[in-house]
Amino acid sequence: MNPQNLSLNPTSIRSKFTKTFLRALTRINNRRPPISPSREIYQRYRRVKIAADASMASAVGSRRTWSRAILWKIRNQRRYRALVSRRISTHAMTKRDPRENYGREVGHGSADELRRIVPGGEAMDFCSLLGETAHYIKCLNTQVQVMRSIADLYST
Amino acid sequence: MDPPLVNESSFSPANPSSYSLAEIWPLGAGIGDPNGGLGLRMSNLGQNLGGLVETSANRDGSAEESTVTEQSGSRSGGRKRVDANSEDESSKIVSTSSGNDVNDSNGKRMKISGFRDENGSLKAEVETSSGTGNKSAEQSTKPSELPKQDYIHVRARRGQATDSHSLAERARREKISERMKILQDLVPGCNKVIGKALVLDEIINYIQSLQSQVEFLSMKLETVNSRMNPTIEGFPSKELGAQAFDAAGMIFGPQATREYVQGSQTEWLHMQLGGNFERAT
């Protein structure tokens, strides 16, 4: 991996994420649909989670595979669900991609698991999967830190 | 390097003597038993090159020469594929390739000549003609880059597909281990773990814990957000300022994340309990 790809400017992504996420939080707070309380809590939680993911991905931009995958997944969630279920049903019958041999040499199970966890990692070869994973971990760290500080700030 | 220059001229298709050499190779291999064929070929090589290379027809000299050729060729190939860390890589390549060639240069040559025989001389003709075109273009543009380019070409022409494949494979492995190292630095407590599978497991665990932390934090933010409704407009500017200051100190160092995780584990449980309690009421 070339290190200049990894050395993203943390301040800019962090501040972008914070700005977008706070805006999304106010938007979520403003429109509060009157549903049954348990459902409402769950839905609002889902909305906050999606807002966090989406603002993180949009702060990163579209130059990374994982952020593109997250944005795509959020944008057409319903279609994605249908597609995933179809893919799962066909996946059992079809042979695996020969590209997955890359993972097999290291440890088949863990590489596949990593593919499942990192968004958009299903179709990557092992090299770029590792690069994406590194970037994704950094961004997740940022996300957790920012969200934690926001939560601390609000709760005090 | 001096020897590559000599070899380059000896194998380059633009040179008329080596052109004849390329035509003679299959013939040399076809005659007699393997060793005799090799010797004949070597003598032909020496005759055809004339004053260019001062190799006698004996096998020791030829073996040395082939060693040099292989070294430089594989080295330039490695440098082309592996851009960042060429020192370690190239040294490895050199050691392996030189060992290879000293041991079984005969076998390689035999294999190559057999290949030539199978495919006939047509392929050789085509390759040499394309090589001449290539080479003249290169000569006109850059004389300094000439040896490297020509070496790659020579290697391809001699049909060492397995060698280039293993080179590419080695480059890929190098890249993977490099990225693994970066990930190990990124994931706290991963430096002590030995073995790729275990490292991957550790990485997966870390990502999962981060993802569940995000989930939990969004749960917490959801409750906090609904409670702090009126004052939310006042926060963003202050928050952003604080974040900017924080960001200066919080570079993604492994120490920072480690202590963050360790500190957050207990707190996390606590917060989770609090959140559940709050939701239940």
Image (cartoon, coloured by chain):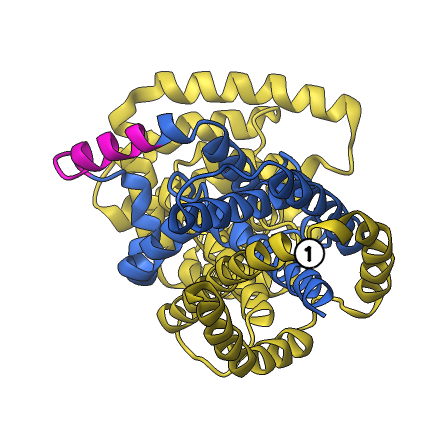
Chain colours: A blue, B yellow
Residue B82, x across and y down, in percent: 59, 50
Task: Determine the image quadrant of residue A23.
Answer: top right
User: Split into 4 quadrants, where in the image is the C terminus of chain B?
Assistant: bottom left
* Any part of residue B62 in sight: no
- Residue B1 as seen in the image, left or right of residue B41: right
Prevailing SS of the magenta stretch: helix
x and y percentages locating residue B184 in the rendered image: 54, 70
Q: Position of residue B151 (x, y in %)?
A: 58, 40
A49 above or below B220? above
Rendered residue at 50%/53% (across/down): B171
How busy is the neighbourhood of tag 1: few (under 14 within 10 Å), some, or many (20 plus)?
some
At horizontal 61% and vertical 52% (from top left) the residue drawn is B226
Identified by mark 1, the residue type is Met
The secondary element bearing badge 1 is classed as loop
Residue nearest the observer in this picture, B90 or B38: B90
Q: Is residue B280 above or below residue A19?
A: below
Chain for disc number 1:
B
Q: Residue at x 78, y 38 (%)?
A: B144
Q: Is residue B165 magenta?
A: no
**Where does the magenta region start and end?**
A81-95
On the image, numbered disc 1 is attached to which residue?
Answer: B228
Q: Position of residue B204 (x, y in %)?
A: 42, 64
Q: In this rendering, is residue B89 above or below B152? A: below
Left or right of B205 on screen, residue B150: right
Q: Is residue B278 visible?
A: yes
Q: How many marks?
A: 1
Answer left or right for B222 relative to A147: left
Q: Which quadrant of the view contains residue A121?
A: top left
Residue at horizontal 36%, vertical 25%?
A: A79
Tell whether position A90 is magenta.
Answer: yes
The residue lying toward the viewer, choosing from B212 and B276, is B276
Relative vertical location of residue B253 with respect to residue B235 in this rendering, above or below: below
